[in-house]
Image (cartoon, grey):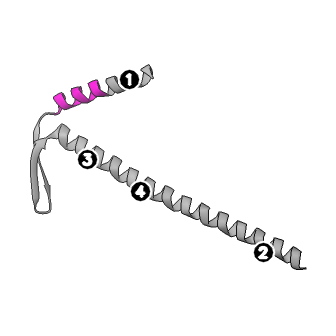
Amino acid sequence: MQIFLFVAALIAILAVIFALQNAVPITVSFLFWKAESSLALILIIAFVAGLVTSFLFNTLSHFKRTRSEISQEKQGEDSKKDITSERENG
């Protein structure tokens, strides 16, 4: 557990150093929208947006895979029931 705290503290220190070295204000334009902020903040926002997007796609993929596995298990159980009923009738 202590190693995780050490790594988190190290990442936090690096993030502060990054923010201090990239405090230059820049203007970001997208379609009709314009915003002025520090370079570090814009880069961090873009990074977090990428993380959120990746998390959402990964969650959606996991959900679809789980539904598919459940469906396949149900089909397998139905096949076993059909085989059992054929043996009993035949």
Which is closer to the viewer, label 1 or label 3?
1
Q: Position of residue 74 (x, y in %)?
A: 66, 67
Q: Label 2 sits on what residue type?
A: Asp
Q: Earlier in the sequence, mark 1 or mark 4?
A: 1
Residue bounds of the magenta highlight:
12-22
Name the quadrant containing residue 82.
bottom right
Is residue 21 shown in magenta?
yes
Q: Earlier in the sequence, mark 1 or mark 3?
A: 1
Q: Earlier in the sequence, mark 2 or mark 1?
A: 1
Q: Earlier in the sequence, mark 2 or mark 3?
A: 3
**Residue 27, placed above or below residue 90:** above
Quarter of the picture holding the N terminus: top left
Which residue is labeled 3 in the image? 46
Q: Earlier in the sequence, mark 3 or mark 4?
A: 3
Residue situated furthest right in the rendering: 90
Q: CA distance from mark 4 to mark 2?
A: 38 Å
Which residue is labeled 1 in the image? 5
**Residue at the (71%, 66%) spot, across then down:** 76
Q: Label 1 sits on what residue type?
A: Leu
- Relative placement, left or right, of 65 versus 85 is left
Which residue is labeled 2 in the image? 82
